[in-house]
Amino acid sequence: MKITLLDPGVERDPYPLYRTLREGFPLVHDEMLGAWLLSRYADVRAALGDVRLGSAAVGPSPAYRRLLEPALRTAAERTAHVLARRMAGRREVDLVAEFSDWLPAAAAVAALGLPWEEAVQVREWCRTGSARSGGCHPELGGLLRPHVTRRRAHPGTDLLSVLCAARVDGQPLSDETVTALAGTLLTGGGEATARALASFLANLLDHPAQLDLVRARPGLIPGAWAESLRRDPPTPVVLRRASAPVALGGATLPAGAVVACLIGSAGRDPFRFADPDRYDIFRADPAHLAFGAGRHFCPATTLAGLAAECGLRALLDAMPGLRWAPGFRPAPRGLMARAPRLLLVRPR
């Protein structure tokens, strides 16, 4: 049986193929893709945490969370409020084009105290794939370095000034560290976070009873967000290359082998999750792999969670009657990157 993710129709609905892979082909070579497909939750989680598969990068210390989170929360709340209020009086709006596509990048830019025009530029870099995580891309470095220099000379109250003045373990942060942290936030406000936010809103709008519960009990939002990431991750396929021989799925792959970690399949593995296709905000342990399987602190992950929490609160506050437009249902598409491209709603 010849199996490939590139078969027609898989981009529209990959879940039948994922089921076939989990049940009968937990590790199989996809000749057209040029990668080994890994589909079961336990195997995918192990692969994402294996340093021989390109996951050796260490995130910044959790001490950075105390520096970043307050400013990020304030910026996400304000940005979400502005975006939601702009749509509130309309008869019909698209939450992708006017909300989820903008909120993460705009919140990161606002937190760092950068001009609004930078949000437009960062969003375009992320949309075209020219921005990379960690702030290492020349375009991001070129954008951020002049701002870092100015904050060193004339600090303000924004997050970039906080980073420039901060000390971690008694040592000031270098310009390279400040630029890398700021760049991680900006790229974290890119396409993957925007897709995750769109899927989150779609899942709740598809389940109005659960949306009503979240509206009444905002403390349920983090669990609802984690469950959405499990069921509909924004990046369903993550490619890794083995730097040394590695045992996976009952076989040993040679150095140089490319492994496709099927996050979208792992999140719906019935050996790990009961009734895995169901969206359930009360699921006890969503244990999603949408942002990897490591335990280090990731500023982009923090930004994504705050965008989801603050974004949903702002929408529900500005649009008490939020619901699908008549006759509309979301249609997620994509293989390597997946989310609804359109979310038509009635605000009132």
Image (spheres, helix red, strand yellow):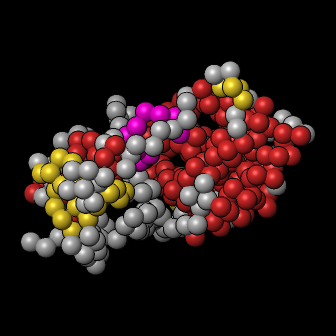
Horizontal side of 198 relative to 147 (left or right) equals left
Q: Nearer the viewer, residue 308 or 127?
A: 127
Q: Which quadrant is home to the N terminus? A: bottom left
Place residue 347 in its image quadrant: bottom right
Q: Is residue 334 magenta?
A: no
Q: Nearer the viewer, residue 274 or 5?
A: 5
x%, y% of residue 230? 37, 46
Which residue is rendered at x = 40% and y = 37% of the image? 294
Horizontal side of 47 relative to 166 (left or right) equals left
- What segment is highlighted magenta in the picture? 290-298
**Residue most toward the top?**
170
x%, y% of residue 196? 49, 53
Which residue is rendered at x = 39% and y = 64% of the image? 336
x%, y% of residue 43? 22, 45
Q: Is residue 146 visible in this depiction of the protein? A: yes
Horizontal side of 301 relative to 147 (left or right) equals left
Q: Nearer the viewer, residue 22 or 254?
A: 254
Q: Is residue 101 visible in this depiction of the protein? A: no
x%, y% of residue 75? 73, 42
The correct choice, above or below, for 36 with respect to 11 in the image is above
Which residue is rendered at x = 84% and y = 35% of the image? 157
| Magenta region, main secondary structure | loop
**Residue most toward the right?**
154
Horizontal side of 337 relative to 254 (left or right) equals right
Which residue is rendered at x = 72% and y = 63% of the image? 120
Q: Nearer the viewer, residue 230 or 33?
A: 33
